[in-house]
Amino acid sequence: MARRIVLAVLALIALLLGVVAVPLGLITTSQDRRDFRDETVVSARTVANVAEEKLDDHRSGPALDRLVGMLSNRQYRVTVYDAAGNQIAGSAAVPPLPAAQLEQARKHGRETVHEADDWFIVTVPVRRDAGSGSAATVVLARPTSDVDREAGVL
C-alpha cells in the first residue's frame, strides 16, 4: 500500500513538473533570447548615434573610440564604415558579416539583423540630422555563447 502511495506521489510530481516547470523554462529561455537581441540592437543604435556626432556634426573627442573599446571589452565586435565603405572606427576584429550583406545594408540604409554561426549581427545606418541619407553604417556582432549556455544549448 505504501509503495502505491509513493508511486502515485512521484507520478503526480512528475506530471506537475511537466505541466508547469517545462513551459516556464521555455518561456524564460525565449525571454532571455529576446532580451539578448534587444540589448544588442540598442548597443548598435547607441554606436550609430555617437558616430553621427563625429561624422555629421564634426565633433572631435574620444566618445566613439571609448564606446567601441567598452563594447570590445564585453566581447562585442564593432566596426563603423563611412558612406564609401571605409572603416573609420572599430574593434581589432571585424564582425563576421559577409561583404554582400554589408553592401546591402549600406546601400539600403536599413537596420538588419543576422545570425551567423555563433554570432548575432546587427547593422544600423548612421542617419544624418538633416535626414538626407546615411552618413555611415555600424556593424555590431555579439557572440551567442553566453545565452546559448544559459538556455542549455551548448
Image: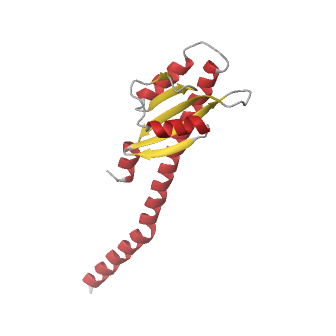
* x then y, percent, for residue 111: 58, 40
What is the quadrant of residue 1 in the picture? bottom left
Q: Which residue occupies 56% across, 34% down?
A: 106
Considering only vertical position in the picture, is 66 above or below 117? above
Position of residue 25 relative to residue 147, above or below, is below
Residue 12 x, y percent position in the rendering: 38, 76
Q: Is residue 39 above or below residue 133?
A: below
- The residue positioned 43% from the left and 59% from the top of the image is 25
Does 107 sit left or right of 75 as displayed?
right
Q: Nearer the viewer, residue 8 or 56?
A: 56
Q: What is the x, y in percent for residue 152? A: 35, 53
Asked whether 5 or 114 is in front, the reply is 114
Relative to 151, is 47 above or below?
Answer: above
Is 80 left, or right, of 75 in this rendering? right
Q: Quadrant of residue 53?
A: top right
Residue extending farthest to the bottom is 1
